[in-house]
Image (cartoon, rainbow, N blue to C red):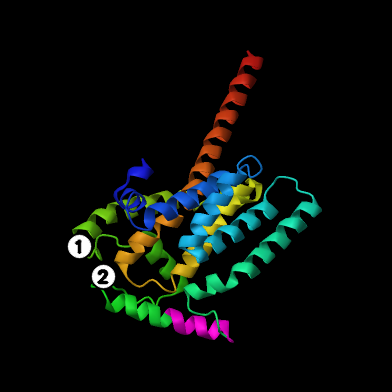
Amino acid sequence: MLLFLPNMHFWTASLGKGGPIFMGVMMFAYSILQPKSRLVTLILGSFIVFYIRPHVFLFLALGAVAGYFSGKEKISSTNKFLVLVGMIGGILIVQDQILAVVELEGSENLVEDFNSFTEDRSENLSAKAGSGVDMSSYSLPFKLFTFWFRPLFIDAPNLLGLIISFENLLYLLLFLKIIKKDFIGFLKRSPSFIKMSLVIFLLTSFAMTFVMSNLGIIMRQKQMVMYFLFFVIYYYLAQKKYLNYKKLQRRKLDKSKVY
């Protein structure tokens, strides 16, 4: 059902960059579960993402490595070292293409120049459309909230924004499902692809909040990363349901032994 929500379905089925970038990201997510047997798909998906949006490929690579290192699966130190070296080498090879996205390929002070770029980009995006929001004064949590869940009815710029507000409300309700005490424990025990999904979601969201200040563009751009949040949420809910089922089965078994 999530695949056919208006905002998600519209941009992932469009004739612009949205469709191909979504296909590449999902190919990457599918292949990373079994990289050895799906190597061709992994390489092809990575190439598509890198060709269209190099910075998104960077987030995918970082998320994959973070999940690979922190997953509950046992991995030898040699394999970890090879993956780390491969990631660092890959980033060094394509660093110029990635920095070119934010016009920093010749920068001598990346932090200062990046701040200047994000301020200029935010002002330009806000000035070019009537759905601009001044996110420069927002705190980081509210910037993230804006990127994930706005517009929300009261700030919908038009009829489309009003329709998307219902969708964003659904996202918000799903997000509230993981605001539980046991979620941290779940993350510690979760497999690598869940941690990878969460890292990709947070890294991409954090980066985009600094350059997005237009609700129309936010609605289009966030579709690349929201599915990674849904992976985490639904895996968490499915595991809770499974554990509750196992508890119920044990109780029934204990009662049968008593009788």
Magenta stretch? 108-118
Amino acid type assigned to the residue bearing label 2 in the image: Ser
Residue tagged 2: 131
Residue beneath the point at 46% across and 56% down? 225
Q: Is residue 79 left or right of residue 58?
A: right
Q: In terms of image quadrants, where is residue 255?
A: top right
* Residue at the image point whose x is 42% and y is 53% from the top: 20
Along the viewing direction, whichever of 86 and 174 lies nearer the viewer: 86
**Residue 212: horizontal and vertical position, in percent?**
38, 71
In the rendered image, the quadrant that contains the N terminus is: top left
Q: Position of residue 67 (x, y in %)?
A: 63, 53
Helix, strand or loop status at disc 2: loop
Residue at which label 1 appears:
158
Going by the numbered disc 1, the residue's amino acid type is Asn
Q: Answer yes or no: do the residues labelled 1 and 2 have beta carbons within 8 Å?
A: yes
Q: Residue furthest top?
A: 259
| Residue 49 appears anywhere in the view | yes
> What is the chief secondary structure element of the magenta stretch?
helix
> Of callouts 1 and 2, which one flags the residue occurring earlier in the amino acid sequence?
2
Q: SS class of the residue under badge 1?
A: loop
Q: Quadrant of residue 134?
A: bottom left
